[in-house]
Amino acid sequence: MCGRFAFFSLTPEDLTAFGVVPGDIGLKPRYNIAPTQQAVVVPNLEPRRLESFRWGLLPGWAKDLKIGSRLINARAETLSEKPSFREAYRKRRCLVPADGFFEWKDTGDGKVPYFVRLKTERPFALAGLWESYQQKGESPLLTFTIITTRPNELLSPIHQRMPVILPVAAYDRWLDPHQVSSEDLGQLLVPYSAREMTAYPVSARVNSPSNDDQDVIRIVLEEDLR
């Protein structure tokens, strides 16, 4: 699964890589984004823009907001089957900008958090789905989930799943509202090249969402965490 991620590259050059013009949504560097918090996404709407959505998908039929905390991830293999994701997969897809994400490795003596990012240290886009949820008499609540797939060679010793990282060339295809073929879209939902990624252990400070600073992604020797 993907339970935490970071997005802190906020220069105009960084943001235009996603095909958007920076908007006034109170952007600030985030090093420890946790479920149910607000995060930046690029939904498949025109004009393409950055939006602030809540992490944890709420389907239109949801009766309880708590459902969102259980739908922070969506398995790529079953998107077309699961009622929670099926309609959003066809119609409401998004990019989730990130500089990296966290996974926890079970060492036998406890779980060690790892920060995973591209070797270039450039931001990238995770594949996501979004929904607009509205209770009677209230404003719409915009939410999203991150799609996961099997791990690549780098991630497999750390965790049994990884988020789908989309190559830049696939952004337009993923956001195309006319692209509804599960077969075509499914070709994008594969593990990213391990050769282009790196992972290193970080402090257990990431376990607390209140710790949202640059020290959260600082490398720590794994033996020092035991």
Image (cartoon, rainbow, N blue to C red):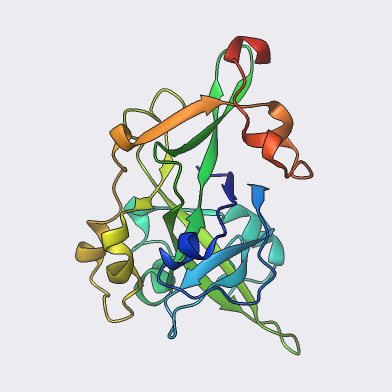
Locate residue 64, reporting x and y percent. Answer: 70, 67
19 above or below 170?
Answer: below
- Residue found at x 61% / y 9%: 223
118 to the left or right of 108: left
Locate residue 165, reporting x and y percent. Answer: 38, 50
Position of the C terminus, as image quadrant, is: top right
75 to the left or right of 200: left
Locate residue 71, reporting x and y percent. Answer: 56, 56
Locate residue 158, reporting x and y percent. Answer: 46, 26
Q: Inspect this view and state whether residue 84 appears.
A: no
Looking at the image, how many numbered discs can be counted on the residues?
0
Return the residue found at the far bottom: 137
- Residue found at x 40% / y 36%: 119
- Residue found at x 51% / y 43%: 100
> Which residue occupies the foreground of this view, 101 or 189?
101
Q: Inspect this view and state whether residue 97 appears.
A: yes
Residue 177 occupies quadrant: bottom left
138 to the left or right of 189: right
204 to the left or right of 62: right
> Which residue occupies the foreground of this view, 15 or 125?
15
> Which residue occupies the foreground of this view, 25 or 148?
25
